[in-house]
Amino acid sequence: MPAPAKAMITCTMVSLVVVTAYTAALGPNGWVWFAWVVLMLATIGVFALRTRR
């Protein structure tokens, strides 16, 4: 797995933990989850582009 794809996956997983902790501590916030979904989609795109080569 290329380094940029691995870094994006790591950032996405760490941000999932942060978003979950935020939700548990302060309650749900749709914008926070929306931002995480956008990051996840970007990660999937980077992974697809990097592994296709």
Image (tube, grey):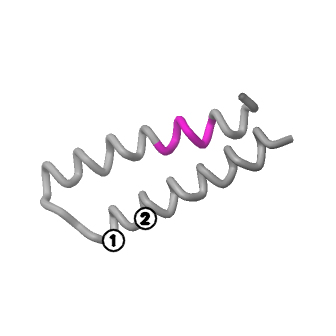
| Residue that sits furthest to the right in the current view | 53
Is 11 magenta? The answer is yes
Residue matched to label 2: 35
Is 9 magenta? The answer is yes
| Residue that sits furthest to the front in the current view | 52
Corner quadrant of residue 8: top right
Give the secondary structure at mark 1: helix
Q: Amino acid at mark 1?
A: Trp
- Residue 31, label in figure: 1
> Which image quarter holds the N terminus?
top right
* Span of residues in magenta: 7-12
Q: Nearer the viewer, residue 29 or 51?
A: 51
| x, y percent for residue 45 | 66, 54
| x, y percent for residue 13 | 44, 39
| x, y percent for residue 26 | 14, 57
Type of secondary structure dominating the magenta stretch: helix
Q: Is residue 15 positioned above or below 34 on the image?
A: above
Residue at 69%, 50% in the rendered image: 46
**On the picture, is 5 further left or further right than 10?**
right
How packed is label 1: few (under 14 Cα within 10 Å), some, or many (20 or more)?
A: few
> Which image quarter holds the C terminus?
top right
Give the secondary structure at mark 2: helix
Corner quadrant of residue 23: bottom left
Q: Amino acid at mark 2?
A: Ala
